[in-house]
Image (cartoon, rainbow, N blue to C red):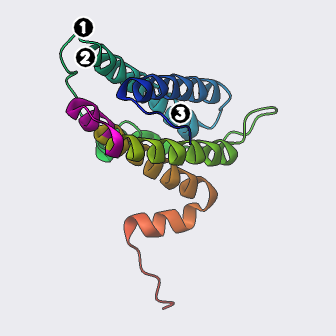
C-alpha cells in the first residue's frame, strides 16, 4: 500500500481512489445485462461519487477553505433497500460479449478489500480529527459495500445456499 505521510496526501489519494472506483463501477454497469448486477454496480458507482464529495469537503477543510463536511452515513440496510425489488425479480439474461457478473463481483470485492484496508490505515494515522472521523465513516461504508458485494456474489453463484442462509431455512431430511 502506498505510504502517505500527511492528511493532505491521504485525502488526495483517497479522492483518486474514489474517482477510480466510480469509473470502475460505471464501466462495469454498462457491460452488464444481468439486472441485479447492473443495478448493484450503478448503486455503488453513485456511492463512490458521494464519497468523492465528502473527501473534497475534507480537503477544503484541511486547506482552511471551509468547515468540516457534514457526514451522513449510509448503512448496509440503506444499500439493500435500493436493490430489494431487484433481488426479488432478478433474472439472468446472458448475452454475447457481456462482462461475466461473477467475475465482476470478484474484481469489485478485491477492490473493496483494498479500499477498506487503506481507510483503516488512514483512520489510525490521521492527525486531524475531522480526517479521522471521515476515514472511519468511509471505512464503515466500504465495509458495507464489501459485504453487499460478497452477498450478491453468493446469490449469483450459489442461489440455493443463499436463500437457505438468508431465510434461515433448516433442511432436516424429512
Q: Residues within 10 Å of mark 2 (few under 14, many from 20)?
A: some
CA gap, disc 1 to disc 2?
A: 6 Å
Q: Quadrant of residue 107?
A: top right
CA gap, disc 2 to disc 3?
A: 30 Å
Q: Label 3, on which residue?
A: 41
Sequence-first disc among 2 and 3: 3
Q: Quadrant of residue 50?
A: top left
Q: Is residue 133 covered in magenta?
A: yes
Disc marking residue 35? none
- Asked if the residue under mark 3 is in contact with the one under mark 2, i.e. CB atoms within 8 Å, the reply is no
Q: Is residue 129 covered in magenta?
A: yes
- Asked if the residue under mark 3 is in contact with the one under mark 1, i.e. CB atoms within 8 Å, the reply is no
Instruction: Tell me the residue at 33%/46% (across/down).
Output: 124
Disc marking residue 61? 2
Instruction: Tell me the residue at 21%/34% (across/down).
Output: 129
* Quarter that holds the N terminus: top right
Q: Please state the extent of the stretch shown in magenta in the rendering.
A: 124-135
* Residue 81 appears anywhere in the view: no
Magenta segment's dominant SS is helix
Instruction: Tell me the residue at 46%/42% (across/down).
Output: 118
Disc 1 element? loop
Sequence-first disc among 1 and 3: 3
Q: Estimate the x, y position of residue 160 in percent, counting from the top left.
A: 56, 66
Q: Residues within 10 Å of mark 3 (few under 14, many from 20)?
A: many
Q: Estimate the x, y position of residue 173 in percent, counting from the top left.
A: 51, 90
Q: Label 1, on which residue?
A: 65
* Residue 169 appears anywhere in the view: yes
Amino acid at each position: 500500500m502506498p505510504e502517505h505521510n500527511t492528511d493532505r496526501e491521504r485525502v488526495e489519494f483517497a479522492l483518486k481512489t474514489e474517482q477510480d472506483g466510480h469509473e470502475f463501477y460505471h464501466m462495469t454497469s454498462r457491460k452488464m445485462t444481468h439486472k441485479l448486477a447492473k443495478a448493484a454496480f450503478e448503486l455503488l458507482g453513485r456511492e463512490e461519487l458521494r464519497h468523492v464529495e465528502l473527501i473534497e469537503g475534507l480537503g477544503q477543510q484541511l486547506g482552511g477553505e471551509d468547515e468540516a463536511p457534514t457526514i451522513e452515513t449510509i448503512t448496509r440496510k440503506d444499500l439493500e433497500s435500493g436493490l430489494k425489488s431487484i433481488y426479488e425479480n432478478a433474472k439472468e439474461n446472458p448475452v454475447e460479449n457481456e462482462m461475466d457478473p461473477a467475475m465482476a463481483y470478484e474484481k469489485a470485492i478485491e477492490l473493496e478489500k483494498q479500499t477498506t484496508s487503506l481507510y483503516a490505515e488512514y483512520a489510525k494515522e490521521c492527525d486531524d480529527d475531522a480526517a479521522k472521523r471521515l476515514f472511519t465513516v468511509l471505512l464503515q461504508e466500504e465495509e458495507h459495500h464489501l459485504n453487499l458485494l460478497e452477498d450478491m456474489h453468493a446469490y449469483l453463484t450459489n442461489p440455493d445456499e443463499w436463500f437457505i442462509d438468508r431465510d434461515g431455512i433448516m433442511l432436516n431430511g424429512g
